[in-house]
Amino acid sequence: MTAGFIPFDAVNTKSSRKFEREAEYAPEDFHEKVFELEAEGEWIVQRVPEPYVEVMTKYGRKKKIPLELTWHHKSCGQCGHIPGYSTSIFWLNRKLNFKYIDPTDQTSCTAWNYYASATSNAPAQASVAMRNFAAAYETGYFPIIHCGTSYGHYKEVREELMHHAEIRHQTRDVMRKLGKPMVMPEEIVHYSEWVHAVRDRIAADQKRDFSKLAVTVHPACHYYKLVQEDAIYDPDIYGGQRTATVSSLIAALGAQVRDYSTWYDCCGFGFRHILVQRDFTRSFATRRKIQVMKEEADPDVVITHDTGCVTTLDKSQFVGQAHGLNVGVPVMSDAQFAALAMGAHPYRVCQLHWHSTEYRPLLEKMDIDHEKAWAEFQDDLKDLKSGKKEYLTWEDIDA
Amino acid sequence: MASDTILIIGGGPAGLEAARLVGDLGHKAILVEKRDHLGGTPIAENYAALTHGFRDAEEAVDELIRGVTHNPNTDVHLSSEVVAAEGSAGSFKVTIAKAGNGASQVVEAGAVIVATGFQHFDPGRETQMYGYYEYDDVITLADAEAMLKHHRFVKPSNGQPPERVCFIQCVGSRDRQIGNEYCSKVCCGIASKQAIEVRQQVPNAKVFIFYIDMRMYGYWENEIYWPAQEKYHVQYVKGIITEIIRKGDRLLVRGEDTTMGRPMEVPMDVVVLAVGMEPSRGTKDVARVFGLKQNKYKFVDVPQESLDPTATSAPGIFVAGAAAGPKDLDDTMAMAGAAAAKAVALVRTRVTA
């Protein structure tokens, strides 16, 4: 499989106009403030470890994305509902020979309940973030955030801590009680930014042909609508008008990105709707997203990059099916898609059996024998049931 | 040594009017213009008709240009920029660089009038919701002016006359999210004027204006707003537009009808974004060269704006037109006259002192 960029229409703008980014309109560069506060002794800045890749953010600034020595801040929803998501991220790291830590002392970011106005206050929220950052710092590894909600929220926390000394000092008091240092990472990095940064390496190791696949992309609101100046953009992806993450990976893997009109809309999860207005969420996900994609783009799969988006888009479709709507598009993360491209097992690694929308026709289009794969996975389960094995290991997965 | 020459930077309506007046008052006016032609934004961006009054823009601006080029006291430097300045009120030494060949010269001036104007807000910079860089049928007021000027108002994507056209107000203005909290003053009037022109040129087109509030200053109410509705049947809809997307061959405008309190989705052939004003590159550069204080939006700051609307933070340097913030043409011309008079008064005092 040759790596490289296959030309395709969707990510090219349909306008004859060309957007030119002007750095002078960028909001303040948080890096300067973060380092200024370090110079004043307010906190330690954890540097992005080398080797890193520099990518471009919305206003043309550079963002450093670490390749390895990463401390993986996992996602409650991924681990609880779609575990193949985080497993795929780890699997990719292992296949690309990058060192990482899967920590056991990370807490939930508590942001989801924060968005539903159900928890906490500003210093408490900040303390949760800073405790996790400190935990990463103590290992010498750099935090990388799996969850879009955590990622967006931590960036908002960084804004609060930078600009409000009172919150900063209250947080510092909490950290003192915990015996932890005040640490702010040089960058707050989402795993999908790492996927973007290593997409050519993934493509170079591609084992399956994806050129027959039509893909729609759902960019995650938590990723690019919060502290938007820090999200990745690329002039070659939709003329620099939409975030480049995810679409860039699909392009690198040679699949066809197809556009649809409601790309900008939320998946339906909302920041709080899935908790407080779940019926609205289900209707939105099916009628405004999946049905529109199906009618306008007829994709084989929709790829996204956040916990809430994968679960909402995937697990709402049964409602549409019950009502006879034109739905039925499998949903997975960029990490799972990339792992499948590199030859990952659909059940042992990507754990697609946790996904509710029918995905087997997609696997067939990827030339994956899902019956054989399922039988292998059933054998694994027999070993677990019989007590022969307590859990599956990476060696089992790569067997 | 004190100089009785006045340097005017910017060859748009404000600069032209100021230069003409300085000349008429018997002083030498040096006019520096970055472009290779005079006329400023109305000419560079192909304005069709003036707001207000509906006079042909090219004809009106040509008259201003002739007022300068036929004036024996004016000296015009095209394709030129002010790159350095020293001195103080009564005696400035200013370096003017010519584009292309890199040649520069130093001129002396007793006073300076900054008339470097504005540029339109770039609707792709802060948000993708307008789709300006995705769909050719999403255009700006300036794009619409150019089509109206040539009496060819069409769907850019296929060259056909549109059946449904809408204007979206306050794009880049009155928007706290992007930091432009100010009203750009003229967009409501210009959009309404263009809506009338679209109805005149494409009589079968239905025309809508989506607005937060219509701000029709002074006589614009009777001259533009009521005729647009009563004579030309332009439909004004109070609402917030959230996004523009493609639906088949058309655009779909989505938002909230705030009067009815409900969401709306309206198909359109052409969407015109009423983009607001921001300081031009020249305004920001010239402010830097002269060390002029700028306000938070980077327009030239006018410390005593109510009573002294042309005085900047630097004695001897005056400002006219949209370099000092959003201005309509009426205010621009009035400021140009005031700046010319104040500049002349200053150099006369210094030279005779």
Image (spheres, coloured by chain):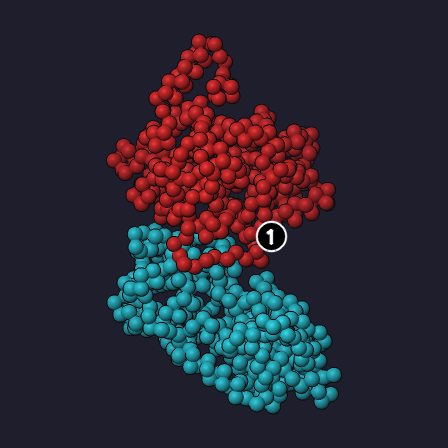
Chain colours: A red, B cyan
> Which sits in the foreground, A42 or B152?
B152
Which residue is depicted at the point 47% across and 9% down? Answer: A387
> Which sits in the foreground, A16 or B246?
A16
Asked if B7 appears above or below A121 in the picture, the reply is below
Q: Which residue is mark 1?
A: A28
Give the position of the C terminus of chain B as an image quadrant.
Answer: bottom right
Would residue B24 appear left or right of B1 to someone viewing this image? left
Residue B93 location, x and y as percent?
70, 77
Res B353 visible: yes
Q: How many marks?
A: 1
Which residue is depicted at the point 46% across and 58% down? Answer: A18
Which residue is depicted at the point 61% across and 82% down? Answer: B30
Q: Say which chain tag 1 marks.
A: A
Q: Residue furthest front?
A: A2
Where residue A313 sits, quadrant-wise, is top left
Give the position of the N terminus of chain B as an image quadrant.
Answer: bottom right
Three-letter amino acid code of the residue under disc 1: Glu
Mark 1 crowd level (few <14, some 14–19, many ≥20, 10 Å Cα): few
Which residue is depicted at the point 53% across and 80% down? Answer: B16
Helix, strand or loop under label 1: loop
Residue B278 location, x and y as percent?
52, 65
Residue B309 location, x and y as percent?
58, 75
Where residue B165 sits, quadrant-wise, is bottom left
Asked if A213 appears above or below A369 in the picture, the reply is below
Res A283 visible: no
Asked if B175 appears above or below B189 in the picture, the reply is above
Asked if A164 appears above or below B214 in the picture, the reply is above
Would residue A279 appear left or right of B348 to someone viewing this image? left
